[in-house]
Image (cartoon, rainbow, N blue to C red):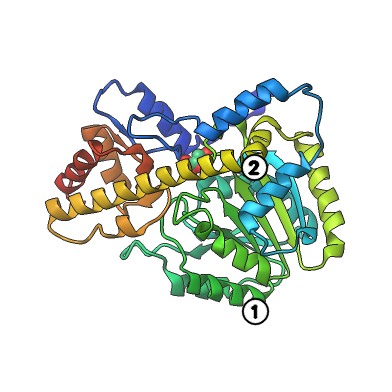
Amino acid sequence: MFANLKAQPADKILALVKAYREDPRAEKIDLGVGVYKNAEGVTPVMRAVKKAEQQLWELESTKSYVGLAGDPAFSDVMIDMVLGGAVARGNVAAAATPGGTGACRQAFELIKMANPGACVFVSNPTWPNHTSILNYLEMEVVPYRYFDADTRGVDFDGMMADLKTAKAGDIVLLHGCCHNPTGANLNAMQWQIVVDILLETGAIPMIDIAYQGFGDGLEQDAAGTRLVASSVPECLIAASCSKNFGIYRERTGILMAVSADASLQALNQDTLAFLNRQNFSFPPDHGARLVTMVLSDPDLRADWAAELEEVRLGMLGLREQLAGELQRLGGSDRFGFLAQHRGMFSRLGTTPEMVEKLRAEHGIYMVGDSRMNIAGLNAQSVPILAKAIVDAGI
Ligand code: LMR
């Protein structure tokens, strides 16, 4: 049996983690995988999460199973954080999942179950694991134009033209905020136009929101998702707590199914629980419990929100420093887009050959499509990166 297995293509982002670890150069810079790092290069446990963990250690009296959809209290706080009252609670079914990736996977399975012929429209580019999982599930993927290689902003005309070709029942996968891998995002007016097209075509939105709080702020980053959820009859939302709570390895995420008709909520809820049972049975609880504790305790919540804001402002500062340094060294505003982009990533917009040159000559690691993790920088490495970019003639 095993001899029949074929080697699978390596995940490019994870391959980069390995290559970086094996690079002996002391001055190397890791702008690869999407993990937040502070100025010391550490991915810290957030203060409120640590406190919640201490409390949990004292309070937790059993490790018995919770429920197939996780603790309903987790669903409540997450629905509140993501949707903020935009949709009646009774219209939302939700289930905890192993991370945001687990939520995406469950969403795709639900789509396949409900409408096996659905095409899934994905931004070009999108997070590579979206397409990888869709291909694995043998679902039809239709890329829509998204990134304008000249302006490094959103090619909104192209996006609209492509989304108009979706049919009723097709799925449009949108990034709620902090687009991965480009960093280019829709503005409020563009979100409204996307909603209008969804209503016109009858296509169903699925929103992946993995970086809420990393872009313009916790509430602002959810605005597009809230607009969509409150405007269309049905949508799916996959949310991750990996980044905004810094609990990557705890695998904490949630899938929400929002229906206009509350009578579908029970069916959706049962379906989400069934899908969990088929794939992994009970979802992980530890991270979800910490998130519930942090979001339900006013003091922990305030401290968490303050630390998240520090993280967000730190990344914004690095963006501005990098754009400024490139302007100073290169004498042009060509890289001004870096300060306009939001979230953890920016696509520099250069060739894989140039990305390889930066790695080989300077020990600078970014994904082959020139996606940089801005949080991998600090005040000292920004000028080094800027000089390498200018010297390479990018
Ligand atoms: C990323 O895009 O780097 C993160 O979402 C981590 C991952 O699993 O790819």
| Residue 55 seen anywhere in this rendered image of the structure | yes
**Is label 1 within 8 A of ligand 1 (CB to nearest ligand atom)?**
no
Residue 207 in the image: state x and y as whole percent: 61, 57
- Above or below, 343 relative to 296: below
Query: Residue 253: which disc?
Result: 2
Q: Are marks 2 and 1 in contact (CB under 8 Å)?
A: no
Q: Would you say 116 lies left or right of 11 here?
A: right
Q: Which residue is mark 1?
A: 200
Q: Amino acid at mark 1?
A: Glu
The quadrant of the rendering that contains the N terminus is: top right
The picture quadrant where one finds residue 251 is top right
Residue at 67% in and 40% down? 292
- Above or below, 207 relative to 59: below
Residue 360 in the image: state x and y as whole percent: 25, 33
Q: Would you say 74 lies left or right of 51 here?
A: right
The picture quadrant where one finds residue 263 is bottom right
